[in-house]
Amino acid sequence: MSDTILIEGASLYGDTSADVLLTDGVVAEIGPGLSATGARVVDADGLVALPGLVDLHTHLREPGREDAETILTGSQAAAVGGFTAVLAMANTSPVTDTAEAAERVHDLGRAAGLVDVQPVGAVTRGHGGEELAELGLMHRSRARVRVFSDDGRCVADARVMRRALEYVKAFGGVVSQHAQDPSLAGPASCCHEGELSGRLGLPGWPGVAEEVVVARDVMLARHTGSRVHVAHASTAGTVEVLRWAKAQGIAVTAEVTPHHLLLTTDLLAGYDPTFKVNPPLRPQEDVDALRAALADGTIDAVATDHAPHARHDKEHAFVDAAFGMLGLETALPVVASVMVETGLMTWTDLARVMSTTPAAIAGLEGQGRPLEVGQPANLVLVDPAATLTVDRDQSVSLSRNNPWHGRTFGASVVATFLRGVPTVLDGKLV
């Protein structure tokens, strides 16, 4: 394969049309009418060029649950979705709470070679919530861990959370919090608390269980001068806390998932475990608040919370089924439909919340860079006029818990390039 690729006629950020020449892993030239002897030509007429997407919140399941996903299959799903970097969450088996475990994930990601796989380290040993994990050793390891999270469990002890924030401050790390007060929403809670949860007889998960933890953590961030990140924000109340905290200059960032931007708790009326997710789907008023917050910058990023599960873990009665849904392959079409096609955001805005800002939060220096000469050639080509109907059986993920099955969206990923090498062309893995 040629080391040089010429992308002809791409619309940069949905605006200016230009050719883009990729050579030796970087953007070599941008302009009209480019040519290069021996270059592989990619026709991008009508396609939007964006920086490669970056996901702050991906569950790759390896090690421990390779029946649901592996680092290789998750990387394939990410590339198909337009991602060039993903952060692999720590709730594996064993938990990624040591330098050795983080380096193993890092090395498997490099071996797959389709996206940059950056391990997330656990905040506490074994996600037990009591004793800090090897935060410094993980950061100093070959994996260079910068983001730490007990995702799936809340760091509920304020003293432990404070110590974690103080510790990571020394090297510019960030703690990503799964905000769920266990005294208000226990492990069995699985439906937004309200009229529907009462009618269906499902244990309620009130929005305040998220909001009180977010409020506590932004105050701890202010006290310590450290950085806190709110994973999968899901309520209007959380948006209010974030807006206040940012106005005070507190170092807080937040993400929202594609499913919380579109799906509502009404879908649970059929007891379909595909729609069981943590935090739960919320009412329309929360969805509207999340969209507005993403548009105005109160919420900084979109993150998939890609959570693959084997069929035998998901196909149960709703209360007993595993939490989570797939997201990597469909994130861009969902966000484009909800935010760009509605006029709430531009393609430039989408690049900010799905590439530039996530890369900055995670400290990924070679990712989320602008489409400019000299920058790493990590980019994605999107067809904004495509009609994409999701078929879960066509997924490259090992799992099939896809909430978008049968839905049609108005944009699709055509090509993905990692440091100038195509990983996806014509929507298919290379």
Image (tube, grey):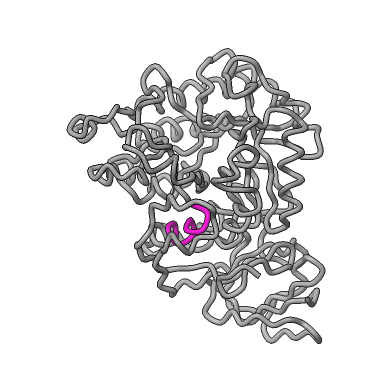
Name the image quarter holding residue 53: bottom right
Q: Is residue 239 left or right of residue 305?
A: left
* Residue positioned 29% across, 28% down in the render: 204
Residue 234's spot in the image, x, y percent? 39, 38
Q: How many marks?
A: 0
Residue 364's spot in the image, x, y percent? 70, 47
From which residue to which does the magenta span run?
Answer: 327-335
* Residue positioned 43% across, 75% down in the render: 385
Residue 85's spot in the image, x, y percent? 65, 52
* Residue positioned 64% across, 17% down in the render: 163
Identify whether 117 is placed above or below 92.
Answer: below
Q: Is residue 46 left or right of residue 365?
A: left
Give yes or no for residue 333 being in the magenta stretch: yes
Residue 319's spot in the image, x, y percent? 33, 32
* Residue positioned 40% across, 48% down in the render: 259
In this view, the residue farthest toward the front is 312
